[in-house]
Amino acid sequence: MKKLNIFSRISILERYIIKELIPPFILGLAASTIVVELIGISFEQAKFVANRGLPISTSLYIHLLKFPAFIAVSLPITMLLASIFVYGKLSIKSEILAFQSH
């Protein structure tokens, strides 16, 4: 049985664009998740820890449980911003014109 290699089905151009998209996507995901998390729950949790005596370990556990929800909120905007950033960079370098001429 022949081993299926997913990368052999992806063209060189698609691999190049994916390779260019990954770093800004990861950086944007980390940054936007932190911002959404800070706005969404951190201030409220800090108030509970300071005023009502909520243990910090419980507060961190709540953050851990809410983390997937914050990532889900951050994914669409992160993908949009990473795509705009990468295609803008490719446009400035005139690489899109080179792609079209191929």
Image (cartoon, helix red, strand yellow):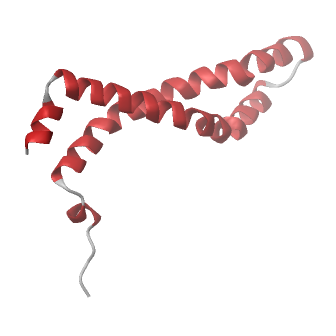
> Which of 53 and 85 lies nearest the eye of the viewer?
85
User: Residue 70: x percent and y percent?
Assistant: 64, 34
User: Residue 30: x percent and y percent?
Assistant: 49, 29
Residue at the extreme right of the image, as rendered? 52
Quadrant position of residue 66: top right
Against 100, residue 9 (above or below) is: below
**Residue at screen point 53% across, 37% down:** 75
Residue 15 falls left or right of residue 54: left
**Residue at screen point 59% across, 20% down:** 35
> Which of 77 and 54 lies nearest the eye of the viewer?
77
Q: In which quadrant is the C terminus drawn? A: top left
Against 17, residue 93 (above or below) is: above
Query: Number of callouts in the render?
Result: 0
Quadrant position of residue 71: top right
Residue 20 falls left or right of residue 54: left
User: Residue 47: x percent and y percent?
Assistant: 82, 13
Against 58, residue 50 (above or below) is: above
**Residue at screen point 89% across, 11% down:** 51
Against 7, residue 24 (above or below) is: above
**Residue at screen point 79% across, 32% down:** 58
